[in-house]
Amino acid sequence: MTSQYKKIVSYFLKAGIVFFAFWFVYSKLTANKNLKDFKNLLTQIPQWEIFCVLGFVLFLMLVNWGLEAVKWKRLISSVERISLWKSVASVFCGLTWAVFTPNRIGEYGGRVFFLSPKRRIIGVVAMAVGNIGQMVLTNVFGAIAFCVFIYRFVNIDPLLFYGLVFLALIFCLFFIIFYFNIKWLNGILLSMRFTRKYKKFYSILARYQKRELFKILLLCFSRYLVFSTQYFILFFWLIPNLHYLEILMMVSILFFVQSTLPSLDLFDIGVRTATASYFFSSITDQEVAVIACTASIWLINIIIPAILGTYFVFKLNFFGNLQRS
């Protein structure tokens, strides 16, 4: 393939990605009644208060994805050294890809194309390690919150409840032990003949020591705190009669359920709002406010970053290194 032909193909690929991203975003935003409800909720609130609260939530969105960029830079450091800005660019570019691909799988492609071609598959494995770390926290806090929810709001036999708590404990321990021994997965793959020939791609799993995995988990925990805070601020602001511990419990359950269901980022709003409406109904009758808050977080954390990421899509070169402007 000639250099000129590669440029033409690369241009059409990037234009196609941006087109699909904007088309999906536009189609969902114009049809989303929940965002209109959120706008209506704000009509009786002073403008300065709206500006301060939403401005801070938007700032936390940047902090959230900034922490993800730091985590990505650390995850890939043993394979390829990249600058923090390049890491930020790859994270936002990945969000643009994720918005119209099932289970956010496009996010992997959006990131690893910022790496040199020979290291892209290894980058997918490294990114999976970070996602597992985030999943560990989501599942652990979600399982704990789910047990508390059942204890408080579900009429259940005590023995059955204790059995559920025991299963939740085993569930949490499994994820924690598996994460801190991720190199076991490398050994399992090496033990199978048909995967052994691909060891150069997944051998990176053996490089992550417990100390490094703990640092990555701290970054995951920081992200968890940040987007939990976003939900907490909006729910506490628009439904002030809620207890802060109840909000944190419901938010943890929301993350937990959301992480277990396969979905598309743009259609994920239906999963989010349905889950939030069901569980929050136990502590408040303000269903419109609950759904509107959930939809606004979806807009801030998913849609706005995806739009910002379209800029970085045009910085890619699918057949080589990152283009420099």
Image (cartoon, rainbow, N blue to C red):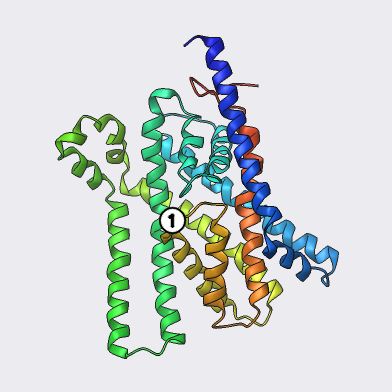
Quarter in which the C terminus is drawn: top right
Q: Position of residue 324 (x, y in %)?
A: 61, 21
Residue 48 in percent (x, y) is at 84, 63
Q: Is residue 306 above or below residue 82?
A: below
Identified at 78% across, 68% down, the residue is 40
Answer with left or right where residue 159 lies relative to residue 310. left
Residue 73 to residue 322: above or below: below
Residue 44: x %, y % from top left: 83, 72
Relative placement, left or right, of 42 versus 61 is right
Q: Secondary structure at mark 1?
A: loop
Q: Quadrant of residue 236?
A: bottom right
- The answer to which quarter of the image holds residue 273 is bottom right
Left or right: 163 as drawn, with respect to 78: left
The x and y percentages for residue 288 are 67, 74
Q: Amino acid at mark 1?
A: Pro
> Dot 1: within a 10 Å radius of its alpha carbon, few (fewer than 14), some, or many (20 or more) residues?
few
Residue at image point 71% right, 54% down: 30
Q: Disc count in the image?
A: 1
The residue at 63%/76% (across/down) is: 287
Q: Residue at x 38, y 23 (%)?
A: 118
Residue matched to label 1: 262
The answer to whether 23 appears left or right of 270 in the picture is right
Q: Specify the quadrant of the image occupied by residue 9.
A: top right
Q: Vertically, is 284 above or below 8? A: below
Q: Is 279 in front, or is 65?
A: 279
Residue 251 makes an appearance in the image: yes
The answer to whether residue 78 of the structure is visible from this angle is no
